[in-house]
Image: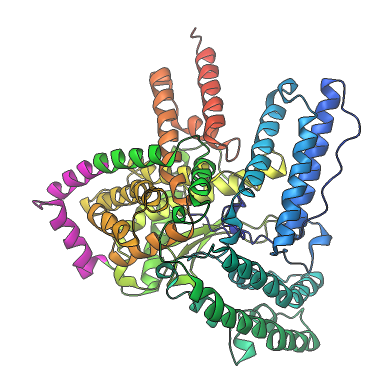
Amino acid sequence: MIQRLSLTAAILVLAACTQEGTVTDPAPAPEVVAETVDERADSFAKIMADHWALRLEENPVLAEQLGHPEGRGRLSDPSLEGYWAGVEARRALLERMDAIDGESLEGDESINYRLLRRELEDAVEAAEHPGRYLTMTTYSAPHLSLARVAERANLRRDEDVASYLGRLEAMPGYMEAVIARLAEAVDQGWTQPCQAMVGFERTYESHIVDDIDASVFMQPLLDNPRVTDGQREQARQVIRDGIIRAFRDFKEFYEGTYKPACRSEAGVGSLDGGQDFYAYRARSYTTTDMTPEQIHQIGLSEVARIRSEMEDVAREAGFDSLAAFQNHLRTDPKYYPKTGEERIAVASTIAKRMDGQLVNLFTLLPRMPYDIRPIPLDVAEGTTTAYYSGPAADGTRAGTYWLNTTKLDSRPLYELESLTLHEAVPGHHLQIALSQELDLPEFRRFGGFTAFTEGWGLYSERLGMEVGFYDTPETNFGRLSYEMWRACRLVVDTGMHAKGWTRQEAIDFMLENTGLSEVNIIREVDRYITWPGQALAYKIGELKIRELRERAESRLGDDFDVRLFHDEILGNGALPLSILEEQIDAWITEQEESLGRN
């Protein structure tokens, strides 16, 4: 999974870069419609530039990383006023695009036009639904994005120090806006379910500290020679009198207002407008026109197929039933790490092994490295088993594969091969780091579509079979269990949000069909509850990539080169699945022509 910290949890910002910024006023519509193709292309180039300027205005951290000083010292605007300003700015950009004949654009410009239009239209359609109120999930929340700003601060220059201090000053006002937005969510009845949010208190209580120097917000300043004693004292005062007080205000609001208003039903379908909202989310996250019911049926079909393969592996391991093998894997302590350090060490070895195999799967690799770190404790117990965050845009921070080192008796080692190949290489790190290095417009280099990125991550797990991984029944079962996990998502996500399933029904379905521990399943189901639709992207995206590969292998036969196929899949950044299919079909035709075939 790619960590996303945007306020709607659905904005496609790569690599978990915290979405920091305020929106500008809508750009003015063009006064004159261009008359020639070249002039229209120039006009579209201006629209792309204005769109990117809007994105940077909304994302000051990214802006600063890319060398724009106006991003320094600023945070995003989490208010509803800021949200609506962003929507109106995008409507204005769409109106300008309407004045351009997109059909007249060719090649890369045509793709850019279609991608930008899709991104803008998706944001405008999102505004038709109340999803803007679901700013907190079991996985992310606005106040947690502030902690990530501190953890990822890289104060190498005097201006970096000044910028960070400015962001500390802005945090109390940011939290006021967060509370106001959530207060309206309570008024509108769009809150998260009670059961799924149990334990959420730890996400803010861990930042209400008496020792200011122990605060995560103070850490970047303590041992940095560029920071003066005066700046440290200034920061301590801001943290003590501003930030911690703001977190206490949030605690009072959450426990006194939001939590008592939490809802009893698991799915958003029970809310006013919830069915339409979820249908939109299903389309948006999968980049298809499929309905929740169609996705549900695909999930059931995949569950049946994968279950048959899991039963074969159980027999290979010497067990007379899948349930017996699952029970063995869940209860034998030899399969579980004793310490967090052991879990990270095993993952590191797996990652290094795959590093050496990448040349057999690709001809083009990213320059940027990645590291492996434990998930911060303020979110670890309530979040998933791992996730990935991408490199800093300016190359000052590597990509990171984050591993959960809590509740180790629920995190088996035999699943680490699949997990590592998904989150690091050849999965998220390779795809995202490479995307940032491609010669593409910025909105494509630093944006994307979840069905592609998570579909690629799941497809990458399967690639391990081709280069020597999963050589024991246990690790192969771990792979199948992870694939089953994603297939079950199609069933339980649509089940809860579109068909009225309860939380317990979703948990029971996953207990019956996956090899995941009960703790992991509960965490996952709560994530699906609080983040409607996102979990649909993985399997739908992976199935499309596998379909395209089978098509290429069938048409190219012995001339199929998997390295070139993967280069082509990743060579245009993250795409909607329909456009990806067009690109791969064109590539197959080009390959056939280069081979002298009709």
Question: Where does the image place residue 82, in percent across and percent down from the top left?
Answer: 74, 60
Left or right of residue 415, residue 121 in this image: right
Q: Extreme right residue here?
A: 31
Residue drawn where x is 52% and y is 34% of the image: 577
The residue sitting at 40% across, 36% down in the picture is 543
For the question of whether residue 378 can be seen, the reply is no
Relative vertical location of residue 203 with respect to residue 422 in this rendering, above or below: below
Does the magenta-highlighted stretch encompass residue 438? no
In this figure, what is the number of numbered marks?
0
Q: Quadrant of residue 122?
A: top right
Name the quadrant containing residue 108: top right
Q: Kindly identify the residue that appears in the image at 25 percent across and 65 percent down.
A: 335
Q: Quadrant of residue 94?
A: top right
Query: Magenta region's main secondary structure?
Result: helix
Task: Relative to 458, say whether 234 is above or below.
Answer: below
The magenta region covers 306-335
Visible residue check, residue 123: yes
Nearer to us in this view, 130 or 232: 130
154 lies left or right of 133: right
Question: How far across and down, in percent of the image, does residue 286 sit?
Answer: 49, 41
Residue drawn at the location 58% of the way across and 83% of the way down: 252
Q: Nearer the viewer, residue 579 or 87?
A: 87
Residue that extends furthest to the top in the rendered view of this protein: 598
Image coordinates for residue 298, horizontal then vertical, percent? 35, 38
Q: Position of residue 58 (x, y in %)?
A: 74, 57
The reply, left or right, for residue 257 in relation to residue 154 is left
Please, which residue is most extreme toward the left here?
320
